[in-house]
Amino acid sequence: MEYRHYNDKKYTYLGGLLHGIDTLLVGLKTSMKVYLRKKVTEQYPENRKELKMFDRFRGTLCMPHNENNEHHCIGCGLCENACPNGTIEVHTETIETEDGKKKKILTRYQYDLGSCIFCQLCVNACPHDAITFDQRFEHAVFDRSKLVMQLNHPGSKVIK
């Protein structure tokens, strides 16, 4: 009697045939389960208004402001230092307060989306949770200079 080897098991001719049919049925069962599963395909251009990405999605870096045009960024520069490719530039200036102390304030927070690798190191490095990633994902432009953004709004200040 001749034996055939498959995965270190010996099969006769009839045993090998039955094993082949068994594996075929397992594959067909898997295919049918996937075929009958609820579809998750998004009809992207048509459903643009109601499309919501998942919570951990890293879209565009943003600096949330409240209704009084205030943010949490103190201009410490930790996010700029954490960025591996220089995507973030934090510009500050030193002012003198009423009581004679010198204080550093944020003048411009510049972000280059075109060179960002979405590693989230800047968000993790920020001690005040001043920056975060939002849900926006459409970034196609013809001019790369449009990908350089200023995240702090004009006239904004730090929340006291």
Image: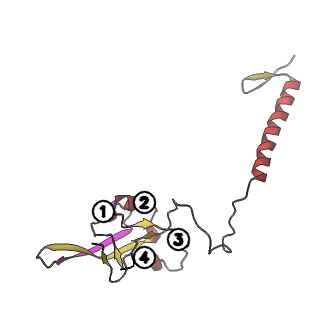
Q: Is residue 74 magenta?
A: yes
Q: CA distance from mark 2 to mark 3?
A: 15 Å
User: What residue would you read off at disc 2?
Assistant: 120
Q: Residue at x 19, y 73 (%)?
A: 103
Q: CA distance from mark 1 to mark 3?
A: 24 Å
- Position of 21 relative to 88 (above/below): above
Q: Residues within 10 Å of mark 2 (few under 14, many from 20)?
A: some
Numbered badge on residue 78 = 1
Q: Earlier in the sequence, mark 3 or mark 4?
A: 3
Front residue of 147/69: it is 69
Give the quadrant of residue 1: top right
Contact flag, marks 2 and 1 (Cβ < 8 Å) = no
Q: Nearer the viewer, mark 1 or mark 4?
A: 1
Q: Is 38 displayed left or right of 79 in the figure?
A: right
Q: Residue at x 46, y 62 (%)?
A: 118
Q: Earlier in the sequence, mark 2 or mark 3?
A: 2
Q: Earlier in the sequence, mark 1 or mark 4?
A: 1
Q: Earlier in the sequence, mark 2 or mark 1?
A: 1
Give the residues drawn in magenta, as a range.
Answer: 71-95
Q: Is residue 124 magenta?
A: no
- Circle count: 4
